[in-house]
Image (cartoon, rainbow, N blue to C red):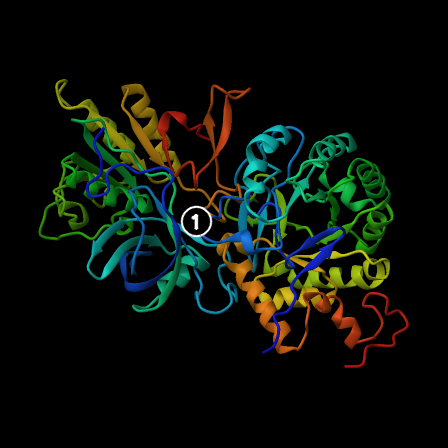
Amino acid sequence: MIPRPDMSVSIGRLTLRNPVITLSGTCGYGDEYAPFADLSALGAFTTKSVTLEERKGNPPPRIVETPAGMLNAIGLANVGLERFVTEKLPVLAGLGVPAIVNVAGHCIEDYLAVCARLDPLEAVAGLELNVSCPNVADGLVFGSDPAALGNLVRKVREVVRRSVLVVKLSPNVTDITATARAAIDAGADALSLVNTFVGMAIDVEKCRPVLANVTGGLSGPAIRPLALHMLHRVYREVAGPAGVPLIGMGGITDWQDAVAFMLAGATAVGIGTVLFVDPGVPVRVLEGMEDYLRRHGLASARELTGRLNALNRGPAPGCNTAGRGVRP
Amino acid sequence: MASFPDTGSPPTPLAKGLFRAQVAANEPLCTGHAELILRFDAFPPAWPGQFLQIQCTDPDGPVWRGGALIRRPFSIGGLRRGPRGVEIDILYRVMGVGTGWMSRLKPGEPVSVLGPLGRPFEPPPPGSLACLVGGGIGLPPLIWLAGELAEAGVQVLAFCGARTAELLPLRRDPAVPVRGAEPSAAWPALARWGVAAIVATDDGSLGARGRLPDVLADWLAARAADAPPVAIYTCGPEPMMQAVAGICRRRGLPCQVCLERMMACGMGTCQSCVVPVHDPAAEDGWRYRLCCTDGPVFPAEHVIWE
């Protein structure tokens, strides 16, 4: 009998029982999906963004479906730090899954205050910096300027001593390896990528944008090839050589997508938008991935990470300036 | 407070789940509208006003392989429990890629359904006449409500509106006359419960000519002073519900509104389906609530109309 593959992976000091993570903003604070699916089997759970003060969020309409995806402009609606700690964290602690708390802010001081408060709490396994929310006025500054991002991460690193520090990268940049490098150099334990792409939809009859916020973040299968490419670049050029784990995300809907992100260099994968359609997807992804490992004779999920490189040693995509081309 | 038959008043929290249903029927209703009947082996207790999130793609195989991505919310338009399981009626208007897919469903095909979702209508105060005011594709939750209330012994009168006769999503019994703003039993979906309906169309092609809130206001004004108190339930286009809520506010009538919002999940996670409501406890007097889990039914006086 073939032994059961070892599904555990490590994100910094944090060991996850498997590489499947639910993503910020798509799974609430933990108990909303309880009637529909058992999330306790997952590797980790990521909360909706928490900000220092409570935020009402943007006016509606906040979402619209677009081809193969959806635009959202929720605007970081959340209960604020203190209510999160008193009302939501106890629920998370009861899930039986490591909780990664996504943190957003207007300025460095906001991030520092939230991270310093959450870091010592037992129920917090990781802190994920949302430096790339496209739906708040100043959300993109940290996410698109490597120097500003490095400065933020360096300061946050000083107050985050216990939990794993993850930086979530924006795809709305000219060169994602630059922000990836800045975050790693400043001390991030791991990177998660990518956040949503800024997009827009227009109601032509009403002659106005569909979203009250005008623009929104595009997620879903529409962004999958773009996200996969960005993850692969960051893995090959920055994170892989630096030994920093990546959490891959962007339009994953089934186990094949999840395995593709792992092969491209992800240590763990995030399931987001598809949870809205079926909260049972993460468990099926996990089952599919386990079966894939068995069929391919792999003993551990860790063997999937970057396996694409092991099989194809061509030049990194995006750096192929010598015109050498990759042998088919 | 009265309770609904069989099921009584809803408990908190309500049972809900992810189900695989089978198409029992899918028939055109009127121009651009159709009625889908789904059959479930089992389904949790449900109440009028609650809704389903239907995955508008084949539930077998990958979650997404083209077509609609997020589920589409539909009010439950009727629910019957029998020895062969549970049947649920969904009345829908073909609008886009999701409802277009639904319109092509054939009997026997599988459909993935989340539900029952949301906070339902509450029964009226004892002794009330329940007036159900529905416009266009806002009618389905009121059709089920009419049946449930009538079964519970509540007096019910329906007000049904559409832009034109062709767009009223109710099958008509041609043998029964419809005269102006008089209650008529020409609509079997309501008449089978002994419920009559006053119909109004914007163009006068059926029933009274004019807007439904005006017809309701005239009817209320003409009532005898000693007639039983009225409780209003409304669902339809937002300007219509806003007008109905205004009439109820001026007359001091209880009014419950069933709202519709674009939503991704229906389970309280995506935070997209917000409704601004008055909240004296909030710093600036208002807050957002979620249409999917705090609603879709709200007391009209809570809603801040946009």
Image: B109 above or below A69: below
Please state the horizontal and vertical placement of residue A293, each as a whole percent of the image: 64, 72
Going by the numbered disc 1, the residue's amino acid type is Pro
- Closer-to-camera residue (A272/B259): A272
Horizontal placement of B251 versus A243: left or right? left
Q: Is residue A95 rendered to the left or right of residue A245?
A: left
Q: Residue, x 13% and y 52% (percent of image)?
A: B173
Q: Where is residue B3 in the image (x, y as percent from the top left)?
A: 22, 35
Residue A69 drawn at (x, y percent): 57, 56
Toward the viewer: B205 or A280?
Answer: A280
Badge 1 marks a residue whose secondary structure is loop
Whether A294 is drawn above or below A136: the answer is below
Task: Give the residue furthest to the left.
Answer: B175
The residue sitting at 48% across, 41% down in the picture is B273
Outermost residue to the bottom:
A328
Splitting the image into 4 quarters, where does residue A236 fall? bottom right
Side of A155 relative to B305 (left or right)? right
Q: Mark 1 points at which residue?
A: A35
Quarter of the image where one finds residue A84: top right
User: How many marks are shown on the rendered structure?
Assistant: 1
Q: Is residue B194 above or below residue A271?
A: above
Quadrant location of the C terminus of chain A in the rendered image: bottom right
